[in-house]
Amino acid sequence: MQIQFEPFAVHKRVPLTISRGTTAQTENIWLRIQQDGIEGWGEASPFSVGQRQSTEDILGALQALAPQLAAYSPLDRQQIEQLIAPQPSAVRTAVDLALHDWLGKRAGLPLWQLWGLDRAKIVPTSVTVGIGTPEAAQQRMRDWMQQGEVKAVKVKLGSSAGLEADQAMLTAVQQIAPPNAKFSVDANGGWSLAEAQQMSHWLAEQGVTYLEQPLAEGQEALLPELYRQSPLPIFVDESCFTSRDIPLLADRVHGINIKLMKAGGLGEALRMVHTAKAHGLQIMFGCYSDSALANTAAAQLAPFADHLDLDSHLNLRDDPFVGASFEAGCLIPNQQPGLGVTLAES
């Protein structure tokens, strides 16, 4: 098979601030594999949690990997998985997505249908409000409401200004959000255990549905105490990369956030779904600064999810791709074969 890849820059409509910093733009990679007149597409996005994966790291790995991949067919999934196993997870994701896209196109079916999934089970995706002043957070909420129907909102907390600033921001957003919108909070590891305990009770009183990554990656040993005391379900993101992490977390969290770039693609994401369900955990899918290509790929597995946070492409000024549609607050994959992603019109 033939392999091609190239970087592309994406710029956020509104820069996103979380407890670790602010992101305004990223340079992602578009990967294509070709065989038998069929082209499969994948995406790799850089990220900074865990083992940081920069655009340069991803490109360097793909340059070394491409000649080795050329010897295989897209149907040689087991052999290819072994070949790419040592690669950074974002590299594995790009290859995995392209292989799945190729297979769906070969079969003439969208992936969700190949897996026998029911799109009617897809829950609303949250839209994200980053850390800022209460006034800025309210404006961001207004922007989202103008962009489409909002049924779920994720508010980023863990401000360096402290818990009072976090509380003021959440209260401001709730004042103008749609009355029936579901709220969740993601601290991105920005709190101490004492702060997380305090905030879990306060957030429950505000009607928040769950709390994501309250403690920093590396502090998983403190999670059981928070798990025992928190009135809210606890989800982890930065603390959970692949299915191997799930058994170690099952006694101290209620759910996991699956991101394709962490997992290494749809194949591992599906393993994470089944592993989490076997341990009685809830499932959500999230994203980094992913385009519609990667988020449409994640949407193929969305019927499995209890919660969704696949909104990064909705905050891009220059997304080169079109895929799943944002309808009535939900991200719905289409009927086209494979991932169902095409290039956006200029």
Image: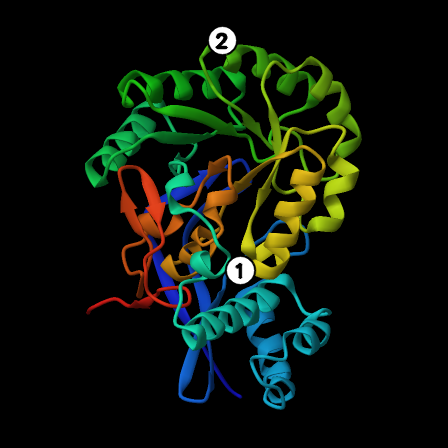
Q: How many marks?
A: 2
The percent position of residue 65, horizontal first and vertical second, equals 63, 81
In the picture of the structure, the residue carrying the numbered disc 2 is 205
* Residue 265 seen by the camera: no
The percent position of residue 217, horizontal first and vertical second, equals 69, 39
Characterize the local packing of mark 1: few (<14), some (14-19) or many (20 or more) Cα atoms within 10 angstroms. many
Q: In this view, does 81 lie above or below 207?
A: below
Q: In this view, does 15 lie above or below 187?
A: below
> Quick one: 149 or 10, which is closer to the camera?
149
Q: In this view, does 38 lie to the left or right of 53?
A: left
Q: Earlier along the polypeptide chain: callout 1 or callout 2?
A: 1
Q: Which residue is drawn at 77% across and 26% down?
A: 222
> Quick one: 72 or 230, which is closer to the camera?
72
The percent position of residue 230, horizontal first and vertical second, equals 64, 16
> Quick one: 42 or 116, which is closer to the camera?
116
Q: What residue type is labelled 2?
A: Glu
In the picture of the structure, the residue carrying the numbered disc 1 is 46
Q: What residue type is labelled 1?
A: Pro
Q: Is mark 1 on a helix, strand or loop?
A: loop
Q: In which quarter of the image is the C terminus?
A: bottom left
* Residue 183 seen by the camera: yes
Q: In this view, does 336 lie above or below 214?
A: below
Q: What element carries label 2?
A: helix
Characterize the local packing of mark 2: few (<14), some (14-19) or many (20 or more) Cα atoms within 10 angstroms. few
> Quick one: 36 or 180, which is closer to the camera?
36
3D distance between C-alphas at marks 1 and 2:
36 Å
